[in-house]
Image: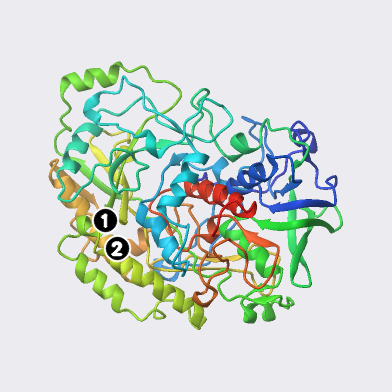
Amino acid sequence: MLGMIQCVLALSLSFSLKYANAHPSASPSNTYDYVIVGGGTAGLTVGDRLSESGEFTVLVIEYGDLLPEGFVQGQTTYNITSAPVTDLNNRTFSVDIGCIVGGSSAVNGRIFQRGSAADYNIWGELGGVKSTTWNWNNLLGYFKKGVQLTPPKPEIPAAFNVTYDTQYWGRNTSNHSIFATFGNTLRPTVFPMYQAIKQIPGMNLPADGGAGEIGMMYAMTSTDPWTGARSYSRTGHWDGLNRKNYELITSTRVKKIIFERGRAVGVEVSHRFGQENLRVIKAKKEVILAAGAIHTPQILQLSGIGPADLLRRAKIPMVVDLPGVGSNFQDHTFVPDVTFRLNSPLPVPPALLEAANAIIPDNLGVTSLGVAAGLPVISPSRFASIAKDFESQPASKYLPKNTHPTIVAGYQQQKRLYAREMRSLGLSFLRIAVTTALSGNDSSIVSWQPVNIHPLSRGTVLIDPSNPEAEPIVNYRAASNPLDFTLYVESLYFLSKLMATVNATEISPGPNVTDLTAWLRGKTIPSVYHPVGTAPKMPREWGGVVDEKLRVYGVKGLRVVDASIMPTLVGATTSMSVYAIAEKAADLIKGKLRA
């Protein structure tokens, strides 16, 4: 997760000038082949791939700073507070997203995961075309291209069953890459919990966490295997490249996209702190929006692309009436306080305890065990009725009032697919981190943070019509669909049954809590800092914003390449999926791949 810090201060210009081709906002050229808005996870990846041949000039524009590695000064996330979440007791929450070169990949918790094959096949189905390359089989190649595997250390005891399969991973020896790295240590108490979870009916044990399956598996971290430092888009796609045709400017705000005769031809920018006049930077080929799921819809709306009524109220001249911009907002939600007390210590075989403790820790951290469970595993007696209840809901019932019919149509398609997957073992509806649950100071306490990994509710990210250039209004609308509470209640029962097998007593919510939904309203957090979906890759008649080639509907020369194009969440942390999207997008832009 992101640290609870705010993006308020900038570094002095002298720091930025230490990096090749990084400029203050006043010094770049006026014209490039490609102008990329956002120097985060996706933006730097696309910038690297478009500039690597030397054929094209590429500029990346970043609102945050380029901090020298290890330098601690200033803040690295945006200062945004959400709208009150009605169904979570009107609480507000910090919207933490990266405000730094590297974006959220520079500040996240490093847990590096893929979703299941079903996650990505749903993306393909939501494209609305019979022949699509947005599916697991195609994206696997981009996962392999974008991320290199660091295998687990051989000294990890075999009883932990830390396995991997190289067919799902790229592998090289270069230190210029994005790395998925296993740590070399494991907490011995993971072993008895692993044994207990393995006995759950229907629990799958994938041979590799990146194989497109759900079940109990080990997670990697985005860590450089040689140094132990964070591996992220800046280290993998900017540092050390030193290309004259690949430039980056920082502390620069993109005010809007400039259009001529229906084509994006550039962007209007200013210094982040208003220290210079507005200027225009031209794009000869394309403008690529990679500002993330919060700021990409804002920039589109400020540029006249979005819901017509919103643009009218904000007094912004309309370029394209595109109702889906800023709708379909999703994030993983979690409950931070599901706690049990062990009545007796977890039984670790002495030989295994000795072997695990003999491992000399290195700087690569702890290998983390987690579980992604399908609804038939979480709730074997109720999964079919829950799927039926969801299927029978009118699509518009729990969407915002007066939602545009195209957005309702798109949600209907999502409902159809989710209801189908609720009856299967391919899509997870609960994710728990076993290692984290066992990591407290008191070894008798097991504290879970169950994640609703595929929530049914949908929110919005919209400009404030009374102050359009302020931060957008982020409305999670978490649990607006009451079936999200149903999913959570079933997850609590699932954890209770699991912990009974290891002789544990529930502390929280505990036996005195008789209304679990009321308890959940006060506990649930609507974000695991994985915002997606606000410029979805779906047909325009389904509320989509971009097509299968990520081109924005209704204009030319403009694409979106970031988490906002995901029509639905993946059952994992999102950064690895964003790298794959960016790798694929680069091939689409260069014409190497059909849609």
Residue 120 position within the rendered picture, expressed as x and y whole percent measured from the top left: 41, 56
The answer to which of marks 2 and 1 sits earlier in the sequence is 1
Residue at (33% x, 33% y) in the render: 164
The amino acid at mark 2 is Glu
Say above or below: 577 vs 235: below
Residue 501: quadrant of the picture = top left
Please say whether residue 453 is visible from this viewpoint.
Answer: no
- Secondary element under disc 2, as helix, strand or loop, is helix
Q: Which amino acid type is shown beneath numbered disc 1?
A: Gly
Q: In the drawing, does residue 510 fall left or right of residue 416?
A: left
Q: Which residue is mark 1?
A: 374
Q: Residues within 10 Å of mark 2 (few under 14, many from 20)?
A: many
Note whether 563 is above or below 73 in the view shown. Answer: below
Q: Which mark is residue 104?
A: none
Q: Nearer the viewer, mark 2 or mark 1?
A: 2
- Contact flag, marks 2 and 1 (Cβ < 8 Å): yes
Q: Position of residue 16 (x, y in %)?
A: 75, 36
The C terminus is located in which quarter?
bottom right
Is residue 439 left or right of 249 when viewed as pictured?
A: left
Q: Quadrant of residue 551?
A: bottom right
Q: Is residue 145 left or right of residue 186?
A: right
Q: Determine which of the numbered discs, if any, sits on residue 421 in the image.
A: 2
